[in-house]
Amino acid sequence: MVRLGNGKCIIGFDNGYQFGKTARALFGNGIHGLGKVEPSVREHSLKYGRKFYKVGEGRAAITEDKVSDEDARLLTMAAVAKELSMEGLRKAEVVLEVGLSFSDYGREKGRLLEYYSQKPGLRYEYEGTRYDVDICRVFVFPQCYSAVAPRLGNMEGSYLVVDIGSKTTDVV
């Protein structure tokens, strides 16, 4: 997470097919709906609306896209909460940066931008703590490129970059 001078925060989130990853957190992408039943253990628990979920335990089934249900939003809420909690924040305007695999980037980028713009105001509880998050801007980047982009100025010669995920393998 990066704090900007205007009070906003940049949070990057890679919603992988096995793990969710931020700059400082790694967690499983499994989501289990509990309905209105409050979990007895707060760890990995999320309350959104009037429903409870366990987020970050296990592995979700692989789907064709990440925007056909609420799962990506729930995982993003957990990721944002993890980053904000490390800074002692409970309320923030967030510039959200998300990654897509190179193979999905052209097909999914527009739908992902639309998905996050549908519900930019997120009011939820994660592990018993209330968060008020406004997603003020969303950027979508190809994952593999994002890993090397900051280093390009220092790299000489030719490189082959390979991103091996649990569903996709991308070569740049």
Image (spheres, rainbow, N blue to C red):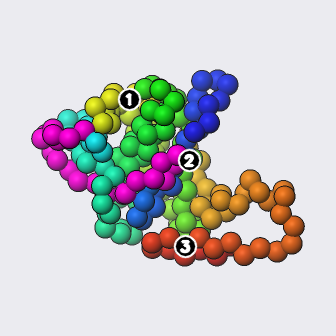
Looking at the image, residue 122 lies above or below residue 43: above
Which three-letter amino acid code belongs to the residue tagged 2?
Answer: Ala
Give the mark nearest the N terminus, 2 or 1: 2
Q: Residue at x 79, y 59 (%)?
A: 152
Report which residue position mark 3 lands on.
164
Look at the numbered disc 2 and give the secondary structure of its residue. loop
**Range drawn in magenta:** 21-42
Select label 2 or label 1 by which is in front.
2
Look at the numbered disc 3 and give the secondary structure of its residue. strand
Q: Residues within 10 Å of mark 3 (few under 14, many from 20)?
A: few
Give the mark nearest the N terminus, 3 or 2: 2
Which three-letter amino acid code belongs to the residue tagged 1?
Answer: Tyr
Let me know if residue 48 appears in the view.
no
Rounded to the nearest angstrom, the CA distance separating label 3 from label 2 is 18 Å
Report which residue position mark 1 lands on.
131
Image coords of residue 113 (percent x, y): 51, 50
In the displayed structure image, the side of residue 38 where residue 170 appears, left or right: right
Report which residue position mark 2 lands on.
23
Q: Is residue 34 magenta?
A: yes
Q: State which quarter of the image contains the C terminus.
A: bottom right
Residue positioned most to the left: 37
Image coords of residue 84 (percent x, y): 48, 33
Which three-letter amino acid code belongs to the residue tagged 3?
Answer: Ile
